């Protein structure tokens, strides 16, 4: 399971961001031809005002989307140990990889511990029996050092050293893996990424580090899926499409119409997708690359199809 999880983390199928979230060619040409930073900011602000997202630094956020070749959905961090970006499509595999690696280190430590204790006791007993009487003014004599490096260091006892080495290596990895695994368990419970832990995501009402947290168990199911039988298996069961996520109630119930146009819609957290007590996972019902950019008609269709997410319905039914 450890090797399987490691393999899936490295070679996961990272799907690209849909084209509708990228700058069109016309906007990109305007951006590249702009001579000042203020002009670039104006272009991006005009383009992003109708998108279902809110960014704190418009220029930087959108230039990342435009110019980086490999953009990942729900980006967590880039991990050199797996030579891949940890994101929506392989986050479950990464968590399982950390968990199984930690268990593997604990298993090595537990199997080596009896031999390590025996090795240490044998060393102390040997030293006490042969060397303590040869101590001269608190220091070992030459004869004592020869005993320690002689009989105790023969081929009969040489096999003990690799056990001690394995124990300490497993201990060091267990400490680092335990810290990292515990931190990511905390992130899963609060439905955050590593990047969001350092900088809270922005909503219409402002920054909210818990904006995507819908309860610890629901947060867990977003990553590991709704089927308990597959939670510990490195197969993809995460809920969602990597582009749209449920938000907390205070962001769902914010005003979603503009004073000038009663049918208008604003940005993330302003479109009301559910009037119930649960949470919904809206799904696109049309082609991602051919339709207009998140039009009001599509949001209306999603709102009509949405219903509270109670955990019993399959994700595809919503």
Image: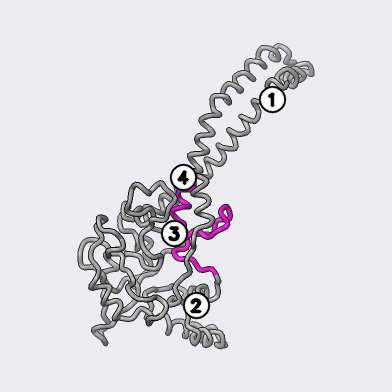
Work out which quarter of the rendered image holds the C terminus and state it. bottom left
Residue 134 occupies quadrant: top right
The colour scheme used here is one colour
Q: Secondary structure at mark 1?
A: helix
Q: How dense is the environment of label 1, judged by Cα within 10 Å: few (below 14), some, or many (20 and up)?
A: few
Q: Position of residue 87 (x, y in %)?
A: 47, 60
Judging by the rendered image, the residue that carries numbered circle 2 is: 59
Q: CA distance from mark 2 to mark 1?
A: 63 Å
Image mark for residue 131: none
Proximity of marks 2 and 1: CB atoms separated by less than 8 Å? no
Q: Secondary structure at mark 4?
A: helix
Q: Residue furthest right?
A: 142
Q: Is residue 214 above or below residue 104?
A: below
Residue pictured at 44% horizontal, 59% vertical:
193
Judging by the rendered image, the residue that carries numbered circle 4 is: 99
Q: Would residue 166 be seen by someone viewing this image from the given angle? A: yes
Q: Which residues are magenta?
A: 70-98
Q: Secondary structure at mark 2?
A: helix
Judging by the rendered image, the residue that carries numbered circle 3 is: 193
């Amino acid at each position: 399971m450890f090797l399987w999880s490691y393999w899936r983390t490295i070679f996961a199928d990272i799907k690209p961001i849909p084209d509708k979230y990228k700058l069109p060619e016309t906007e990109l040409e305007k951006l590249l031809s702009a001579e000042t930073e203020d002009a670039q900011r104006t272009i991006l602000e005009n383009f992003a005002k109708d998108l279902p997202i809110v960014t704190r630094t418009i220029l930087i956020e959108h230039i990342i989307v435009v110019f980086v070749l490999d953009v990942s959905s729900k980006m967590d961090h880039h991990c050199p140990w797996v030579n891949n970006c940890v994101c929506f499509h392989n986050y479950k595999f990464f968590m399982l990889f950390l968990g199984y690696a930690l268990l593997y280190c604990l298993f090595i430590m537990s199997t080596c511990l009896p031999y390590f204790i025996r090795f240490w006791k044998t060393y102390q007993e040997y030293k006490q029996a042969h060397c303590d009487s040869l101590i001269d003014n608190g220091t070992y004599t030459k004869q004592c050092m020869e005993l320690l490096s002689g009989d105790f260091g023969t081929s009969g006892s040489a096999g003990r050293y690799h056990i001690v080495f394995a124990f300490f290596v497993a201990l060091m990895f267990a400490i680092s893996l335990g810290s990292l695994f515990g931190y990511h368990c905390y992130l899963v419970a609060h439905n955050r990424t590593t990047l969001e832990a350092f900088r809270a995501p922005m909503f219409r009402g402002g920054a909210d580090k818990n904006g995507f947290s819908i309860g610890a168990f629901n947060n867990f199911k977003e990553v590991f899926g709704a089927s308990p039988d597959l939670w510990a298996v490195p197969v993809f069961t995460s809920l969602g499409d990597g582009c749209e996520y449920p938000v907390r109630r205070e962001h769902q119930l914010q005003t979603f119409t503009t004073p000038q146009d009663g049918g208008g819609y604003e940005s993330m957290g302003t479109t009301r997708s559910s009037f119930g007590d649960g949470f919904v996972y809206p799904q696109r019902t049309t082609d991602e690359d051919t339709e207009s950019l998140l039009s009001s008609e599509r949001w209306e269709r999603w709102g009509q199809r949405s219903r509270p997410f109670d955990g019993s319905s399959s994700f595809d039914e919503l």
